[in-house]
Image (cartoon, rainbow, N blue to C red):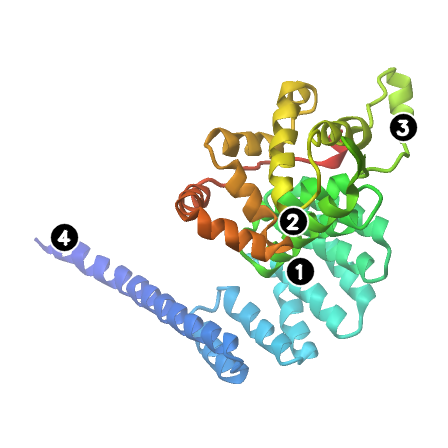
Amino acid sequence: MKNILLTLTLLVVITLPTFAQDDNIEKAKILGAEAIELIDAGQNLKAINLLREAEKLDPENIVYPYEIAYAYVEMKKYKDAISILEGLLTHPDIKDYVYQMLGNTYDFDGRPKKAIETYEAGLKIFPNSGKLYVERGNMEFQNQEYEEALKYYELGIKAEPTFPSNYFRAAIIYLSSRDAVWGMIYGEIFMNLERNTKRTRIMSEALYKVYTSQIKVIGKNKYSVNFASNVINISKEDLESDSVKVPYGNVIYEMNMSASLVGIKKIDYNSLMKIRTNFLNNYYAMKFDKEYPNVLFEFQKKIYDAGYFEAYSRWLLSAGDGKAFAKWAKSNSSKWESFVAWYNNTPLELSDEYYFHRTQY
């Protein structure tokens, strides 16, 4: 009996600190949640006080000092934020978002070179961080070095295919270039990854504008299609392998688009629904999907087979002509609601092995 009692006593002694520790962690979580609400409401000083209390209760948690730094950034107290974030670089639970915010804060503080150094240091530790690639690209973008920016955005797409921001940034550049084809694909992928934000609406309008500006009716069944430059890049590797790639933008995308325009009299929101359906059907009828598989077009085919491709396309381009979309949605409310319910439960699934990248073509 004595041995049993001794064992029970030891268990109580050992367990009590664990319960106390768990209780502190839960209290810290509650304080942290309250603090984040205060930050959202612009009450940063109150938030910092709560976060410091949370940090005392759970001192090993990287989240609380990170959020304190974020509150200082919101207050434009960049040096205070930098001091905290620099201290977190040796934290055992360091994450890529610490390097991201530290780099951003250096930039806000007028130290762009230090920001670049921070993103690059972060990429050495987190080579698959889409966040750090997009920030590194943004540094080039703000200096109007668009080709360099694209390099980082597309590296980010390869590194983390499910992270939407690199698609958005790359698409915006391509849609303003002579090779808009890549922006059309990156942009639509972005909208499937980030479906209901301000950026989604920006991309919707951008895609619509490129469709309507780069497809022209010039006569009866005569059209001008311009989504790709006429420059054909042939690498040394292509020549050595005797397998020069067909220029996808010109030969595949534009040719298919041209074939999809037969019978179209004008290019507007409503006719684009027919054009997009023709494009998808032609892509598969010509068996381009075998030689040029494309995760976006495979997802479109899935939507088409489910009977929702028109509704999907109308949503995709809705910001281009809001009145036309609203009129259609009102007249087809059951079809629209059915699509939304289906689409909300049907994500575009990407992975490190299954994604779209321009260099695949």
Q: Position of residue 189 (x, y in %)?
A: 62, 42
Q: Earlier in the sequence, mark 2 or mark 4?
A: 4
Dot 4 alpha-carbon crowd within 10 angstroms: few under 14, some 14 to 19, many 20 or more: few
Q: Earlier in the sequence, mark 4 or mark 1?
A: 4
> Could you say which disc has been placed on residue 235 in the image?
3
Q: Classify residue 29 by image quadrant.
A: bottom left
Say what amino acid the circle numbered 4 marks. Answer: Asn
Question: Is residue 166 at least partly visible in the picture?
Answer: no
Residue holding disc 1: 99
Q: Which mark is residue 26?
A: none
Mark with earlier residue (2, 1): 1
Pointers 2 and 1 in contact (C-beta within 8 Å): yes
Q: In the image, 181: left or right of 92? A: right
Distance (Cα) linking label 2 and label 4: 55 Å
Could you tell me residue 95's position as x and y percent? 59, 56
Crowding at label 2, few (<14), some or many (≥20) Cα neighbours within 10 Å? many
Q: CA distance from mark 2 to mark 1?
A: 10 Å
Towards the viewer: 179 or 273: 273
Task: Name the kind of residue labelled 2 in the image.
Answer: Ser
Position of 85 with respect to 246 (left or right) is: left
* Residue 69 locus on image (x, y percent): 60, 73
Residue type highlighted by circle 1: Tyr
| Residue to which mark 2 is pinned | 129
Snapshot quadrant of residue 50: bottom left
Q: Nearer the viewer, residue 31 or 192?
A: 192
**Between marks 2 and 1 in the image, the one whose residue lies nearer the viewer:** 2
Nearest to the observer: residue 154 or residue 22: 154
Q: Is residue 248 visible?
A: yes
Mark 4 residue element = helix
- Depicted 356 relative to depicted 100: above or below: above
Give me the disc on residue 3.
Answer: 4
